[in-house]
Amino acid sequence: MTLLQRVPLSIRILTAMLLGFVVGGYSSTVYESVSALADAFVLLLQMTALPYIALSLMVGIGRLSALEARSTFKQSLSVLLILMLTVVAFILLAPIAFPDWENAEFYSANTIKVGAEFDLVSLFIPANPFNAFANALIPSVVLFSVFLGVGLMTLPRKLSTLLFLDTIKDAVANVNGIVMRFAPVGVFCIAWRAAATVESSQIDGLLVYVVTAAVLVLLLAFIVLPAIVAVVTPFGYRQIVKASREAMITAFATGSFFVVIPVIVEKTKALIVETNPLPVRVDKVSGIVVPISFSLPVGGKLLALLFTLFAAWFSGAYISAGDYANLLLVGIPQLFATPTIAMPTLLELFNVSGAMFDFFLVAENLIVGRLGAVLSVMFSTCLPLLIATSMVKKTTFKWRKFGRYLVLIPLFSIVTFLALRYTFDAITYQYQGYTKFIERDFILGDVKTTHLDRADDQGPIGLTSADVLTRIKQRGFIRVGYYRDDLPYSFNNNKGKLVGFDIEIMNQLAADLGVAVEFVKIYHKEAAQLLDSGYLDITTGIPVIPDSMKTYTLTVPYSTQAIAFIVEDKRRAEFVRWSEILKREDLIIGIPETFYYRDAIKRHFTRGKAWEIATPRLFFREEYKHIDAMLFGAPTASAWTLINPGYTVVVPKPVQPPLSMAFPIGRTDRGFELFMRNWIHMKKQSKMLDRLFDYWIGGKES
């Protein structure tokens, strides 16, 4: 045996992971061979995991008698609930660490996204088991394997079949063991790639969540869960950690609990046999409960509840005792699916913007998914140890140690979370949303530009005979009207430069026409006259509503806005459903004049009051506090909350069809309308409009 082989595999894996992080941190380059080796290692682990789960369940359950099956189920259910409730209790305790920070977010398509319906029946019942295996539908595979195991239980000649399946299972376990020999190389490549591709900007807004989740996982995986097992079973703390350490390190490196299930089963089985050398075959418990636990809402999956609480805190949502109860009763069943599938529904429980789903994906891909895998490993290690001990009636309840732990561990945890909160408060936190918004500049280049603060009195006042395109060419510039307080479509950045989504579109229009551009600040009531007189050629966008269609000729739509409300953070829950909003008689709704569709307002706001306001800026002033909410487009509303982070955007359910945005032009020139129709279509095809939307409204970097 060489010196390297004498080093435990877990130490070699951990060393390789740390080396990978160091190399990746110093080098942002990830070679194709490194990425290929990382992918190959994960795929090899996945290759054995699903067959091993199915075979373990079939063999483990098939060997049981009806009496043993009932006993195993009864013991498993009670132990599972105890461990699960313990983890949930600490998760509900963790938000103590969240400091009092204000925040607002750019618009995201997820703000108006409706979460997919959660179908528990389709998720668990495999109409086609082969399809479930082919598409790795784990809950369906688990249920199918359980039923097949139950079917084998009562067969009189099952021994030969079980022997064959057991042999195949052992072969799969051997293959997994061979793959694990290459774990240091695979983990090194994975760590290198992760460290080299992470963006520091992604971490800024998630520091509180990531650190809190890390502390929570460390408490549960290395103190709470092992302590429970050590108190009530013959297994010692060191034995528990030793049995789980290889799987924990590999799960952390790969970010997957699924791929280490065979390792957990074999390690816990060996530990049970070592401690219980009795005729009773309790070692088969591992092969049953560990694979099943993958599909249950336990272990690392429960960290999704912590993110839901974090998202509510981060968005300023008020959380009541009823919300906590709702989270447990409605939220936990969602986690039979993957946390990624369940998250949109969990966010809706607290009326949190779907844009927080982007934060969740970033956190999962950075580190929290890996932490969740570690917690799942320890949870699934403790579960069979507790069940096996209970089945052979070797529970050794140490009352003195239990009493000590019952006081010290919760107290230590509370102190730890309070220390985290104090640390976060001590950090000089500065809200960055306004700065990121106001410092934006063009990403596609400038053309020669001039600005007027008001329409020139010397401009033409009657209809002009020249068509718009000819007039623009003769003049040498296109004259564009832009509206006051029209964030994020037109505004002045921190350098005083006129910028915005519509402003950059107009710059690109001028560039394609080969002319300069002159921007004129106007009021909405001036637009129709200035366009018809020929003074203005076009204005920045407005919603396509009948009131506008009667006043202007509008281009084809270039963008859309979903209808939303801007409300104070603490009042978010009052504006979740249209049915509740429209039947209230005490609400006063402010509506900016561009969105004020008079017939629709009269038709829908029959009980409450709707006020037309000249500019959204008024809504945030003290003298307008009697207005409860402002109805607006979601992209525009998000921009205003960046400036006023004490407010939030709510898109009531059911989500209404979005309003189209179009550019007003004069009513007499059909040639220019045809030109703009083709030009907008061309820019949509080239994805230029999507790119500008993502930058100015979605807040993404260029």
Image (cartoon, rainbow, N blue to C red):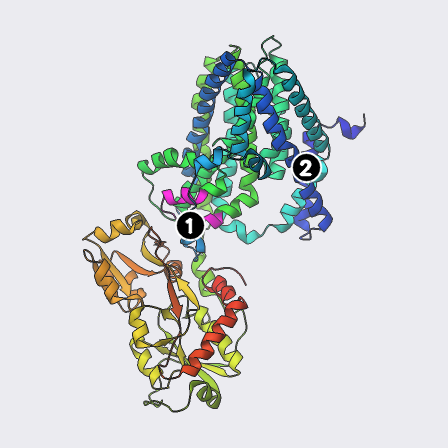
For marks 1 and 2, give the CA distance.
Answer: 35 Å
Is residue 691 magenta-colored?
no
Point 28% across, 49% down: residue: 574
On the image, the x and y values in percent for residue 599 come to 24, 65
Is residue 355 magenta-colored?
yes
Q: Which residue occupies the foreground of this view, 384 or 440? A: 384
Image vertical order of residue 78 relative to residue 46, above or below: above
Image vertical order of residue 275 relative to residue 621, above or below: above
Asked which secondary structure carries label 2, the reply is helix
Query: In the shown orientation, is residue 151 left or right of residue 433?
Result: right
Bounds of the magenta segment = 343-359
Q: Residue furthest right?
A: 2
Q: Residue type at mark 2?
A: Leu
On the image, the x and y values in percent for residue 476 come to 48, 87
Which-is-in-front pick, marks 1 and 2? 2
Query: In the shown orientation, is residue 634 left or right of residue 200?
Result: left
Image vertical order of residue 67 relative to residue 469, above or below: above
Point 71% across, 46% down: residue: 34
Whether residue 240 is visible:
no
On the image, the x and y values in percent for residue 13 come to 68, 34
Query: In the shown orientation, is residue 640 left or right of residue 506?
Result: left
Which residue bears the numbered disc 1? Answer: 354
Q: Residues within 10 Å of mark 1 (few under 14, many from 20)?
A: many
Which residue bears the numbered disc 2? Answer: 44
Q: Residues within 10 Å of mark 2 (few under 14, many from 20)?
A: some
Asked which secondary structure carries label 1, the reply is loop
> Which sits earlier in the primary sequence, circle 1 or circle 2?
2
- The quadrant in which the C terminus is found is bottom right
